[in-house]
Image: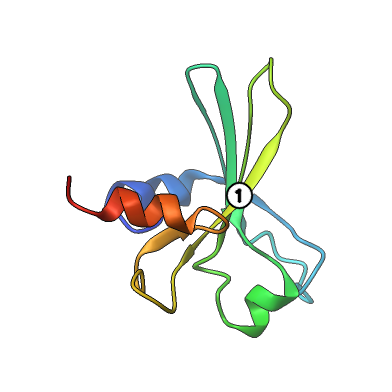
Amino acid sequence: MWIANTASRRRQARCRRSRPGASNPAAEAWLPILHTRRGPWEFTALYSNTALAHELNRIGDWIVIYYHTDALPEGQCTVVTESRGQMTGARVVRGREVECGARAQPA
């Protein structure tokens, strides 16, 4: 939910912006990129700029996160707002919906 709160929106305004080649006929640098480090982990987060994200009007919703440490190879996940099922409206990591649902349940 890094885009959902005010502090994160301010951070987004300060993020470096990329000029993606796909779906960008005006060649504008509009795609904010967040780089951060948490302990040994390095993260890069950006909006999904895929054809499907554009087609479904989700470029401001789907977030792709790349992560790695010096000891581990790079991984990637996509965070979306769920559009069906019990988690409708909740932020979930694609492929990890079960864990996201369990985390959302009260203890």
Q: Which residue appears farthest toward the right when viewing the image?
A: 21
Residue 103 horizontal/vertical position (percent): 31, 48
Label 1 sits on a secondary structure element that is strand
> Which sits in the foreground, 39 or 99?
99
Q: Is residue 58 above or below residue 65?
A: below
Residue 32 appears in view: no
Q: Residue at x 17, y 51 (%)?
A: 106
- Horizontal and vertical percent position of residue 29: 68, 59
Q: Nearer the viewer, residue 19 or 22?
A: 22
Q: Can see residue 60?
A: yes
Q: Quadrant of the N terminus?
A: bottom left
Tally of numbered tags: 1
Q: Is residue 65 above or below residue 20?
A: above
In the picture, measured across the screen, residue 11 lies left or right of residue 104, that is right
Classify 84 as above or below 87: below
Mark 1: give few (<14), some (14-19) or many (20+) Cα within 10 Å. some
Q: Quadrant of the C terminus?
A: top left
Query: Foreground residue, 74 or 55?
Result: 74
Picture residue at 24% right of the left edge, 54% below the top: 105
Its colouring scheme is rainbow
> Which amino acid is tagged 1?
Cys
- Dividing the picture into quadrants, the one containing residue 58 is bottom right
Q: Is residue 11 left or right of residue 69?
A: left
Instruction: Determine which quarter of the picture holds residue 94.
Output: bottom right
**Residue position marked by numbered label 1 in the rendering:** 77
Residue at image coords 76%, 60%: 20
Q: Residue furthest left?
A: 107
Location of residue 62 by image quarter = bottom right
Q: Residue at x 75, y 72 (%)?
A: 24
Q: Is residue 10 left or right of residue 21?
A: left
Residue 49 locus on image (x, y percent): 68, 66
